[in-house]
Amino acid sequence: MRNGDKSRKRVLFGIPFRLCTVLGLTLGNFFLPANAQTIIAYITNSASNTVSVIDTATNRTTATITGVGAAPWYLAVTPDGKRVYVLNMDSGTVSVIDAASSNVIATITVPAPWAVAASPDGKHVYVSSILALNGPNTISVIDTTTNTVSATIAVSVAANSIAFTPDGKYAYVPSTSNALSVIDTATNTISSTITVGALPSLIAITPDGKYAYVANQPPNRTCCSALPNAISVINTATGAVSATIAGVTSVVGMVITPDGKHVYLVAEQYNTVWIIDTATNTTATNVVVPGLAYSIAVTPDGKHVYALSEDSSADYLSVIDTATSAVIATISPICLQLCQSQGGGPDLDWEVVISPDGKHAYVPNRGSGTVAVIDTATNTVATTIAVGSGPVQVGFASVQLPPSPLPICNSCRSSQVCCICARGIWTGKECI
């Protein structure tokens, strides 16, 4: 080796290589933190058969995933954020997306998929199939290591949703048989069946896992007039109905606050958000919102609840302060000019979801192929993102960022050493 070559190895763009190494600024990592991550949003586009990928830090679409099946609808993300499982309603399949690469890595046959949930340990994904309204139907258990169906559980009738206890030992499945099936996840067998009210559809389990709240359905169904159309409260230790809360029917949205003290519900054809006190299992307060409410979400800190509603002329997002049970802001219209120019209407907003960091609320609009992004700090529409046709559901994953010099240059504008080690250009004042 010539002396010139040896000396060049010790210098990096005129900066001693040892100095860059001492500062941790080698070319290999561009001094990005080893665990630098960002929150990615995945939006199923039911009409264009794609999944849009949005970086929530910038609220820009970074990828459009093709290769999923027909009518991608509901999705579940594993707790570690590595895999996204998408139900393709018209294909009878489940697409598995690798979050790191945004590629479909497996397609699993599951007939007539309807509801999906990932177990707390991320080892399994449960998918309900509605083969016939009055049964028989099934729950398919997908092994997330092999992405194959490792077990199939027979259920009598249609399973509308799936919820796991926090410890992952049991999965609760309400069905149209006016009963709640309890699945032992160790054996993948039904350990018990609990009779609840008419046509149970939604279920939410308290953070401590002690109680399950089951929403029973409309009182005008002649099939079920003898059964209670209310909220059934299940004691998960005994498997018994410990309380029945009357006066709340046709529930289409239900969330439990992170402290487990309150349940918030919205029901179709009502302009009301019901609030249940879990200590007394009574409706503590009713909050009136404009139009008819149909979706609800709670922020990770539990301080605010967002209720989505509509009437014939507009859509609304009401922000409720959970400390006072008062509406502190109403956002309308949610669908901005881009949405309206593409033919969207207030009746096509699908749901409201909150990002894991609590910074934004996302509202997909099926009519316009857009997603409205609400800044939860100001409770204003921050932007509207064009996605695919017929966006339906939003899911989130935390993804590790690949090394990139650009964010580093932005974060060390005042340091020449930092800038040059990152392969940036030092102007004499800042790094570009």
Image (cartoon, rainbow, N blue to C red):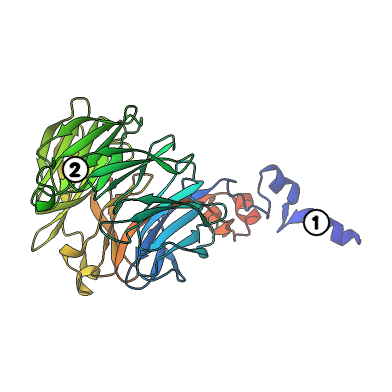
Few, some or many C-alpha atoms within 10 Å of disc 1 (few <14, some 14-19, many ≥20)?
few
| Residue in front for this viewpoint, 258 or 14 | 258
157 vs 127, left or right, is left
Across and down, in percent, residue 218 comes to 12, 49
Q: Quadrant of the N terminus?
A: bottom right
Circle 1: residue type: Lys
Circle 2: residue type: Leu
Question: Residue at horizontal 44%, vertical 34%?
Answer: 167
Across and down, in percent, residue 31 comes to 61, 49
Question: Residue at horizontal 35%, vertical 32%?
Answer: 209
Across and down, in percent, residue 409 comes to 55, 55
Instruction: Specify which label sits upstream in the sequence, 1 or 2.
Output: 1
Q: Please indicate, yes or no, whether residue 378 appears anywhere in the rendered image.
A: no
Helix, strand or loop at label 1? It is helix
Across and down, in percent, residue 54 comes to 41, 60
Residue 154's mark?
Answer: none
Few, some or many C-alpha atoms within 10 Å of disc 2 (few <14, some 14-19, many ≥20)?
many
376 vs 345, left or right, is right
Position of 171 relative to 218 (above/below)? above
Q: Please indicate, yes or no, whether residue 209 appears anywhere in the rendered image.
A: yes
Spatial CA distance of label 1 from label 2 is 65 Å
Position of 25 relative to 244 (above/below)? below
Q: Which residue is mark 2?
A: 265
288 vs 50, left or right, is left
Helix, strand or loop at label 2? It is strand
Q: Which residue is mark 1?
A: 9
